[in-house]
Amino acid sequence: MKGTKNLYIANSGPVATVVKWRIGASTGTVVAGTVGVPGNSSTQLYSPMGITLDQWYNIYVADRTNNRVQLFCNGSSTGITIAGRGSGGSSISAPYDVKLDSQLNLREKNIKILNFSAQDTKKQALRFYSMSATTASASGDQQPVSLCIAQIEQVRSQLQSDIEMLQSSIQRLQFAQERFGELS
């Protein structure tokens, strides 16, 4: 991942995991899947092939044999099926790679499988709401995808705190400038 000293590796076959290795470390940490237990539950992968991370270090995994894309929120070992299997879910076949474009649309084999939407009252289409939205998204099988919302709210809260601190500093500088004249 650009800007980090970590390498993320998809282990296919009987291991069926995604491992995070800190560059220079002698061991890695399993961040998705259950070691040696391939499967199709929310904590398992069968054939993880392609992986990508977003700016919040959430992991998107193309789980080839399960015909799905799983989202593992940063720090969570439970995945969310955001494309593929599931009643009413989108249909994808043996995904081998997954990417996020500059607008954070999720693509598999260069086909957009997730896109942003401000409204989806029927929740029949696969949607992933903007990271700046306050609502969670919903997948095609009407299961809420909300595990990452708390993390987004933490980012929003921190940004708001930073903005308030900056505004306070500007007000203090303006007061000092009015009281003591131009500062150099």
Image (spheres, grey):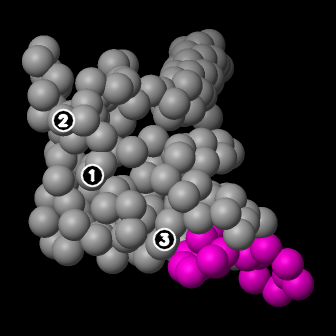
C-alpha distance separating marks 1 and 2: 9 Å
C-alpha distance separating marks 3 and 1: 14 Å
Kindly state the secondary structure of the residue where label 1 is placed.
strand
From the top left corner, tell me how far across and down residue 8 is, in percent: 60, 74
Bounds of the magenta segment: 7-28
Say which residue label 1 marks: 84
First of labels 3, 1 by sequence position: 3
9 relative to 178, above or below: below
Which label number is shown at residue 61?
none
Q: Residue at x 56, y 81 (%)?
A: 13
Q: Nearer the viewer, residue 159 or 184?
A: 159
Is residue 131 visible to the viewer in this orientation of the structure?
A: yes
Mark 2 crowdedness (10 Å alpha carbons): few <14, some 14-19, many ≥20 = some
From the top left corner, tell me how far across and down residue 22 is, in percent: 76, 75
Q: Residue at x 33, y 19 (%)?
A: 135
Which residue type does callout 2 highlight?
Gly
Kindly state the secondary structure of the residue where label 2 is placed.
loop
Image-based side of 71 in relation to 38, left or right: left
Which residue type does callout 1 highlight?
Gly
Q: Nearer the viewer, residue 59 or 70?
A: 70
Which residue type does callout 3 highlight?
Pro
Kindly state the secondary structure of the residue where label 3 is placed.
strand
Is residue 57 visible to the viewer in this orientation of the structure?
A: no
First of labels 2, 3 by sequence position: 3
Which label number is shown at residue 48?
3
Which label number is shown at residue 88?
2
| Residue 161 picture quarter | top right
